[in-house]
Amino acid sequence: MTVNYTEKIAKCEEYIAKKQNLISKREKQIAKQSGIIAPMLSQIGLDVPTVYDKETVRNLENANQKFANAKGLCVYQIPVCESLSEALYTISDALESIRNARRDIEDKQKTLQTYRDRVAKEENKDILIQQMPSAFQQFRNDLLTKWDEYDMTWRPFIEELYPRYEHAHHLLSRRIRYVPYDYIDYRLLSEEQKAKRDAVVEANAPAVRLLNSLERKFKPFSHLVPLIGKSDEQIHEDNVVATRNLILELYERVIKITGAITDAEYLHVTNGNDGITINGLVKGEKGTARVESHGCAGYNIVRYYVRTNVYPVH
């Protein structure tokens, strides 16, 4: 399955922007409250702080409580102290919100950087493929076309078959009763226990046979299930990644033998009755490699696939 990093990056940036807006709102809230409490602080002989943090708010709360205690009254019995307490609570809550938002932004920025690094890595892969000899690029493009055609052709078939298989499988499974003493070695059962077990097994036999038959018919097509619900664009994106990884793996095996490639004139791609294959010699600074391949398809093969072998030429 293809990971859409562009979409993930956009969501990360949107999340960070929302948190930054939240911080801006909370800072305005603190500024508004600081303007309100300035005259209150002067009434009880406290200086107006220039910066609000947790410690500052705590000190103001304590001073506010001490002022009320000196009067011999509860904070809520002095209007100035009560209003100041409410304002300080609002500021404290805003500071907490800002701290959490900044922490969330920091975590999300790390995730965002990870996604950007992966995008850069994928772009570097594409650049490397563009710099490969033309035979490698042709092999990848031909294989991509064939895989797209295969997946888009078989998708309607599996989308129609799979729901019917699931429904039938569910109905048959419900008809199969639990087999008593199934967890005990048959030889250790008494005659009565064997009779009970054999009776249930015999009763289940028709449903089990139908279920096994259904699964045998579906098994050759089980590899098509991931295509269900995918659009042509999603299928193509998945195959772009798959063919890119395949050609990079082949290229790495070749240059492991040849080093930097100097001549790939004798490396050819054929697209005929035997499918798409890549064969020939590749020369490099360290040596020469022979590439041999043959197509594979059939029962229990996901789709047409090319097996490639790379050998050093001495």
Image: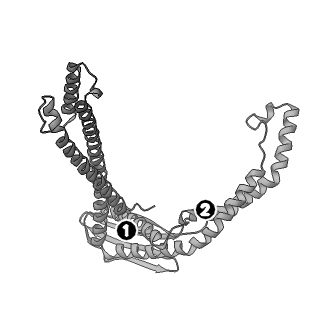
Camera-side residue: 206 or 313? 206
How far from the left and from the top, in percent, is residue 256? 31, 60
Q: Is residue 178 above or below residue 115?
A: above
Q: Number of marks in the image?
A: 2
Which element is circle 2 on? Answer: helix
Camera-side residue: 93 or 99? 93
Residue located 27% across and 53% down the image: 21
In the picture as drawn, the residue positioned furthest to the bottom comes out as: 272
- Binning the other alpha carbons within 10 Å of mark 1 as few (below 14), some (14 to 19) or many (20 upward) gives some
- Residue 314 is at least partly visible in this image: no
Tell me the tag on residue 190: none
Look at the image and name its color scheme: one colour
Residue designated by label 2 = 222
Mark 1 and mark 2 lie on one chain; the one further toward the N terminus is: 2
Image quadrant occupied by the C terminus: bottom left
Q: Amino acid at mark 1?
A: Arg
Camera-side residue: 98 or 171? 98
- Residue 180 is at least partly visible in this image: yes
How far from the left and from the top, in percent, is residue 31? 19, 45
Gap in angstroms between the C-alphas marked 1 and 2: 36 Å
Which element is circle 1 on? Answer: strand
Q: Amino acid at mark 2?
A: Ser
Q: Is residue 105 above or below residue 53?
A: below
